[in-house]
Amino acid sequence: MEPSPLAPIRRAERRGLADEAADRVREAIFTGLFQPGGALREVELAASLGVSRGAVREGLAVLAREGLVQSEWHRGTRVTEVTAPDVEEVYAVRAALERVAARAAAERSGAFEWDDLDRLVDTMAAEIARGADVTRLLALDVEFHDRIYRLSGNRRLLDAWLAIRSQVHLFLLTRVRLGHEQYRGIVVDEHRELVALLRVKDLTTLERVAEEHVRSAGRVLAEQLADGR
C-alpha cells in the first residue's frame, strides 16, 4: 500500500534533490508544520516531495548538521527538541557574534544600507498591524540579522552565524509558540533601536544593545522552558 503524501509540503524541483529536500523540510519546520520532537519519516517525506528515500536521507543529514533534526537508532529522525542547555549555549555564542557583527557593520556601511534596514523594520510593523502569521514575522527577524552579518564584510563571521542560524530560527519558533504576545510587543522597537545606533555609529552603545538584544531573548525562552509551558 502506497503511503499517503504530506500535502502541505511543496514538491521538490529538479536541481540537487538532496538539497531541495533539505530546503523543503526546513521550510516546513520553520512554518510550524513539523513541531520540535515530531517524527520525520523517510517514506512519507519521499512520497510527498516526489524524490527517492536516498535524497530524503541525504537532505535530513544536511538538516542534522544544522542542528534542526536529530537521528537516533531506536527513535528514527525527529525535529530537534529545544532544551534550556541548548538555549544557554547557542545564545551565548550568538550574543558574542552579534556584538562583533554590529560594530563591523556600523564601521563599514552607510545611509543606504540603514535605509534598507529601516524598510525591513517597517515591514515587520506592517505585518503586526495586519495580524499576519507570526512565522512571517520570524522570517523577517532572521533576515534582519542576516543583513547585519553580510554588512559586516567578515566572511568568517558570516559563516559562524550561518552555522547556528537554523537553530536560532527554531528557538524563535519555540519562543513564540510558548507565548508570542511579548515577542510581538518588542520586536519592532528593539530592531528600530539597533538601526538608529548603526546609523549614528554609537559603537559602545551599539555593542551593548546588540548583545543584550540576544541575551534577553535567551532569558525569555529559558524562563518559558523552565515554566514547562
Image: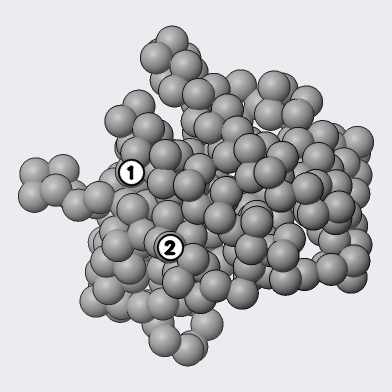
In the rendered image of this protein, does residue 169 appear above or below residue 47? above
Question: On residue 80, which mark appears?
Answer: 1
Using a 10 Å C-alpha cutoff, classify the residue at mark 1 as few (fewer than 14 neighbours), some (14 to 19) or many (20 or more): many
Label 2 sits on a secondary structure element that is helix
Instruction: Evaluate whether residue 211 shows in this view.
Output: yes
The residue sitting at 75% across, 29% down in the picture is 186
The residue sitting at 19% across, 52% down in the picture is 71
92 or 86, which is in the foreground? 92
* Residue type, numbered disc 1: Thr
Question: On residue 160, which mark appears?
Answer: 2
Reading the chain from its start, which is encountered first: label 1 or label 2?
1
114 or 186, which is in the foreground? 114
As drawn, is 112 to the left or to the right of 224? right
155 or 139, which is in the foreground? 155
Label 1 sits on a secondary structure element that is loop
Q: CA distance from mark 1 to mark 2?
A: 20 Å
Q: Position of residue 145 (x, y in %)?
A: 64, 55
As drawn, is 77 to the left or to the right of 46? left
6 or 101, which is in the foreground? 101
Q: Position of residue 211 (x, y in %)?
A: 58, 40
Q: Position of residue 45 (x, y in %)?
A: 37, 62
* Residue type, numbered disc 2: Ala
